[in-house]
Amino acid sequence: MEKMFCENCNQKVNYFIKTNTIKEYKGEIVNIEENIAVCNECGEDIFVPEIENDNLKRLYAKYAELTGIISTEELIKFREKYNISQRELVAVLGWGKMTINRYEKGALPSKSHSDILKDIISNEERFKSLVKEAFESKRINEKVYTKLSNSFKSSKKNIITSLLELELSHEEDISNGFRKFDLERVENLISYIASKVDNLYKTSLNKYLWYIDFENFKENVRSITGLRYVKQQYGPVIENKGYEKIIDLLDDKFYKEETEDVYSNSTKVKIISKNNYDISIYTEDEIEVINYVIERFKNLSCSQISDESHKEKGWIDNNINNIISYDYADELKMNFK
């Protein structure tokens, strides 16, 4: 143990540790045990920076827990999520240069600062608006603004991926064509289909995906997307209305266009490609199957494609909402070659 300076003895001395309980801090009952360095020579308390800092960290952490003040861990995790430095964050918030540094080293944030930090942690839209305002006010440069904008997109994509995987991902078996749900493959496939089909609507999209997956299983003994399909009135569709979530949540590779159909008094949802798909993620055999199905259906209407799916044994044999096993792939009536 390194000797420390004792003001009473006026020299460096050895010391021992005694403990004391801090019962109250700023009106809150904390009951935190603190360590106190005591001089071996005179018995007076002496100051040891490391010990005092450790005491303060534990005291502030307990106080923050009781009062809802943001913790050091929450702050660091937030910065890591968006890959934003301490100086970049204070620039966005318009605070002093060392503010975040002090908080992460254990200093207790003010209630007002804590409330602002907790707000942007829980509300990404609020944080995005502050970043935009900081850029427009020239507190951050274009490089930082671009980096944070990309972080927002990445964060959104991670959330969407988690939501879709929760609904659509299963262990590999015959129900998904021995492939786990693959969002990248689904997203790029929809974008590619939409780029080749002039009028790709939500109803027909399900049939394109189903036929592509089942035809690929028939030819190559594995599905392309890992999706599971159920029987519905107008043909096979992605389980759990997954097509709704995919169309509503994803917007990197395609977007939806809604129009009101006055004759049927319904909303038609058209899928439009952004033409930034990556076809290289599929094998040559898979691309061949994809193009066969697109070529076979691209000049048919939604109802015509639906009628074709109703001729398939996989749709005929199952009840509404039942999973259609990929076992039925070998019995497809539609000829793509």
Image (cartoon, helix red, strand yellow):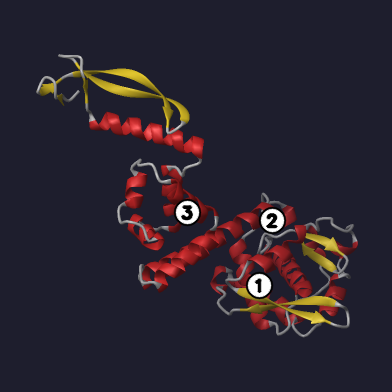
Q: Can residue 205 be seen in this view?
A: yes
Horizontal and vertical percent for residue 278? 55, 73
15 vs 292, left or right, is: left
Question: Dividing the image into 4 quarters, which one contains the N terminus?
Answer: top left
> Are the residues at dot 2 and dot 3 in contact (C-beta closer than 8 Å)?
no
Judge depth for marks 3 and 1 and give the one in front.
3
Q: Is residue 262 above or below residue 167?
A: below
Residue topped by disc 2 = 168
Q: Nearer the viewer, residue 53 or 290?
A: 53
Query: As shown in the figure, which amino acid type bears the numbered disc 1?
Result: Ile
Disc 1 crowd, CA 10 A, few/some/many (<14, 14-19, 20+): many
Disc 3 crowd, CA 10 A, few/some/many (<14, 14-19, 20+): some
Residue at (50% x, 38% y) in the render: 67
Label 2 sits on a secondary structure element that is helix
Residue at (66% x, 63% y) in the render: 225
Q: Which of 57 and 325 is in front in this view?
A: 57
Label 1 sits on a secondary structure element that is helix
Query: As shown in the figure, which amino acid type bears the numbered disc 2?
Result: Leu
Q: Is residue 285 visible?
A: no
Q: Give the CA distance from mark 1 to mark 2.
A: 16 Å
Label 3 sits on a secondary structure element that is helix
Horizontal and vertical percent for residue 49? 24, 32
Residue topped by disc 1 = 190
Nearer the N terminus, badge 3 or badge 1?
A: 3
Nearer the N terminus, badge 2 or badge 3?
A: 3
